[in-house]
Image (tube, grey):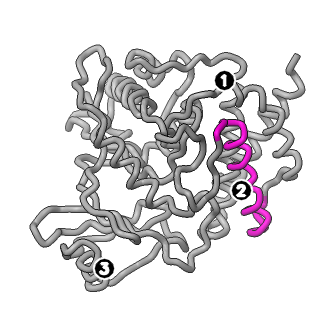
Amino acid sequence: MQSRTKRHLAPDQLDALLRAGTGVGCRVESELSDGWFSTVYRVRLDDGRPAVVKLAPPDEAAVLRYEQGILGTEAMVYRRIADLPGGEAPTPISTPIPIPTAELLYVGREFLVLSVVEGTTWDKAAGRLTHPAEAAARRELGAITARLHTLAPEDGRFGYPAAQSGLLATDWRTAFTAMVEALLEDAERRQSPLDAPPAEIRRLVAEGGDALEEVTEPRLVHFDLWPGNIFVAPADDGSHARITGLIDHERAFWGDPAAELVSLAFGGDAGPDSDLVVGYTEAGGSLDFGPAFQHRLALYQLYLGLLLVVECGPRGYGPTHVAFCRRMLTDAVTRLRTAARTAP
C-alpha cells in the first residue's frame, strides 16, 4: 500500500543509516510493500542474518496525534513480549502460551531491525485452509491474545504509551475520551469527511461513560490484529496451520481487552460462541459480553472507524479505501444511535 507517511531510502542510504546507528550494515534484498504506515525492507545484515528494517515516517510527514512516537511503542511491545516467561501450548490450549512475534534486533531513533517471521500473512493463506484448520487457528489466536492481555503498564496508566502523544490518564474513561478527542481535532485540521457531527460523536462517547468506568485494570491492546498482521505456516494441503508471528505493534495502547475484538473480527467471528473466544477463555482470558461490554465494544468500533477515516487524508489513500472507511464509521455511529434509542 502506498502512503505519504512512507520514507524511501536508496540501498546505500539504508546501509549507512543502520551502520551509523548500530555498527552493522546491510544489503537490501527487497521492499515489503504490504505495510500501510512505515516503509519496510527485507535485508541481509553484514553477519549474514536475514532481517527486516522498519523505517519511521520522515520528520515532515503529516501524522495523527496518536501516531507521535509509535515506533517507540512498537519497540516497547517487542521487549515486553520477549520478557514474558516461556510456556508450552499443549492440547487443549492452556496458559502459559508463548506469543510468537519477531525478535527485536536493533533499535534506532528512526528505525527498528527485526528478525524475519516464518510463514505468510493469514489473509494470503486463508483460501488454502480447510474449515477445521481455520477453526483451530482461530482458537490458537484466541489463546495467544489472552496471553498478550496479561501485559500491564508499569505506571498503571491507560492510553497510548508514547509520551509525545499526551494521551495517558489514570482511568480508562478519561483516556478513551481523550483518544477520541485527539482524532476529532485531527479531523478538523484535515477536514476529514466524518459523515457525523463531531458534537454527536462526543455525545455518544459521553453516554458510554458508565460502561467505560467498569474497566479498572489497563492491559496491552494490539488493536491491529487483522489477518494481514498475523503470520501463519499452513500445511501444503491446508489441513492445519500454526501461528508464527504477530507483527506491527505500533498502534498498541493500554486499555480494555474488549477493544481487541474490533480488529480480530476482520478475520472471522469474534462473538461469544466463536472459536476465537473459546481459545481465549480456555487460556484464562475473560470476556463477559454483558450489556456494558457490548456498549464498550460499539464505542471501540466507532473509534476504529473514526481513526481509519481521519488517516485517509494525510496518507493519501484512494477513493475506494476512503469509501470503505466511511462506511465503517457510519455503521458504528448508527449502531450507537440505535442502542441509545432502545436503552431502558
Which residue of the protein is positioned furthest toward the left in this rendering? 47
Q: Which residues are magenta?
A: 170-193
Task: For marks 1 and 3, give the CA distance.
Answer: 46 Å
Q: Does 67 sit left or right of 104 as displayed?
A: right
Residue at image x 38%, y 43%?
230
Looking at marks 1 and 3 on the same chain, the residue that comes earlier in the sequence is marked by: 3
Q: Quadrant of residue 4?
A: bottom right
Image label count: 3
Q: Secondary structure at mark 2?
A: helix
Q: Does 276 sit left or right of 259 as displayed?
A: left
Mark 1, residue position: 293
Q: Amino acid at mark 2?
A: Ala
Mark 3, residue position: 17
Mark 2, residue position: 182
Which label belongs to residue 228?
none
Q: Amino acid at mark 3?
A: Leu
Looking at marks 2 and 1 on the same chain, the residue that comes earlier in the sequence is marked by: 2
